[in-house]
Image (cartoon, helix red, strand yellow):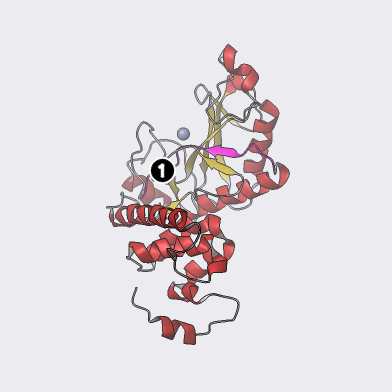
């Protein structure tokens, strides 16, 4: 980035905020204010804002984790210098990976541009971020659902989110759908806190299926006010209510949100090969 630190300091710096924060665009500063667990999103947003230097991005993550350093560099005489350097290098490696990702060619539907945050409250991503891109509205709905869930269940279990879409939409193997950033697979709640999927139709797994909590999750998704759920597809033999029963989806629910009216649903279906295939609606 090419901002002169002194210019940045002159430009409305306040006493509580260390100078290094001003080296990054305003959208990054908002994430810095939210705390260390938003470091990945801060890097992503900084990259979008034009920061291409992995060392600067590593600094960003590092100082988010050590705000009391006020931007002070690591000194070899510090007691834990080796551990701090190791942590900084880890952030640089992550930043390089994200820089490479940002340069990759996108899919057929550019509006599928928002990754599910790795650290959203109440949510646990069970897939790589490359399989968890959605419309901004989809990700906002999920983070809102996660936050409400966390308030009700502060000690867990968290909501386990599986496949959404890939960056830029289009075919996501092995799915037929999941092409427009509005389809989200969510695992059923378990009784034992384990992360893997549970299929209540398999006798040996039935006792690990928490039907009451799963039903509560269905109601929460139905009731969210960010984005309406058009379909919640679940095998009808499982006996959940307020869902769209089918003959598969026996270890997760497939949530399909409506597509926000600001986007052209027909054009989006056409771009991703879904014209005439499946049931999708525009949010009214
Ligand atoms: Zn699915």
Residue at left offset 56%, top offset 75%: 17
Q: Is residue 191 above or below residue 34?
A: above
As drawn, is 1 to the left or to the right of 208? left
Q: What percent of the width, then of the height, locates residue 245?
A: 57, 26
Assess mark 1: CB under 8 A from ligand 1? no
Looking at the rendered image, the quarter that the N terminus falls into is: bottom left
Q: What percent of the width, then of the height, locates residue 20?
A: 47, 73
Residue at left offset 35%, top offset 53%: 93
Please state which of residues 225 and 114 is positioned toward the viewer in this rendering: 114
Farthest-out residue, top: 203
Q: Which residue is mark 1?
A: 165
Please state which of residues 189 and 137 is positioned toward the viewer in this rendering: 189
Query: Visible in this render: residue 227?
Result: no
Q: What percent of the width, then of the height, locates residue 147?
A: 64, 49
Please state which of residues 33 and 146 is positioned toward the viewer in this rendering: 33
Q: How many marks?
A: 1
As drawn, is 2 to the left or to the right of 182? left
Region of the chain picked out in magenta, as a range: 155-167
Farthest-out residue, right: 152
Q: Is residue 156 magenta?
A: yes
Q: Main secondary structure of the magenta part?
A: loop
Circle 1 SS class: loop
Instruction: Give residue 174's quadrant in the image.
Output: top left
Within 10 Å of disc 1 (Cα), the crowding (few <14, some 14-19, many 20+) is many
Instruction: Give residue 58's quadrant in the image.
Output: bottom left
Q: What percent of the width, then of the height, locates residue 220?
A: 66, 42
């Amino acid at each position: 980035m090419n901002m002169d630190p002194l210019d940045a300091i002159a430009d409305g710096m306040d006493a509580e905020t260390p100078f290094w924060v001003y080296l990054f665009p305003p959208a990054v500063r908002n994430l810095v204010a939210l705390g260390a667990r938003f470091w990945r999103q801060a890097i992503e947003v900084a990259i979008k804002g034009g920061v291409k230097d992995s060392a600067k991005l590593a600094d960003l993550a590092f100082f988010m984790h050590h705000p009391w350093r006020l931007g002070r560099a690591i000194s070899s005489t510090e007691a834990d210098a080796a551990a701090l350097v190791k942590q900084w290098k880890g952030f640089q490696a992550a930043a390089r990976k994200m820089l490479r990702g940002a340069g990759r060619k996108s899919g057929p539907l550019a509006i599928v541009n928002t990754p599910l945050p790795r650290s959203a409250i109440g949510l646990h991503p069970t897939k790589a971020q490359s399989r968890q891109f959605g419309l901004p509205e989809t990700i906002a709905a999920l983070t809102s659902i996660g936050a409400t869930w966390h308030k009700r269940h502060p000690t867990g279990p968290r909501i386990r989110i599986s496949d959404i879409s890939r960056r830029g939409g289009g075919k996501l193997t092995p799915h037929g759908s999941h092409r427009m950033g509005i389809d989200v697979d969510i695992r059923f709640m378990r009784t034992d806190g384990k992360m893997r999927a549970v299929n209540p139709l398999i006798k040996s797994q039935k006792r690990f299926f928490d039907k009451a909590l799963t039903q509560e999750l269905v109601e929460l998704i139905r009731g969210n006010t960010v984005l309406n759920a058009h379909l919640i597809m679940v095998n009808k033999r499982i006996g959940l209510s307020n869902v769209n029963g089918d003959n598969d989806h026996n270890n997760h629910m497939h949530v399909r949100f409506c597509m926000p009216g600001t986007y052209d649903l027909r054009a989006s279906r056409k771009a991703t090969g879904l014209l005439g295939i499946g049931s999708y609606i525009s949010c009214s």
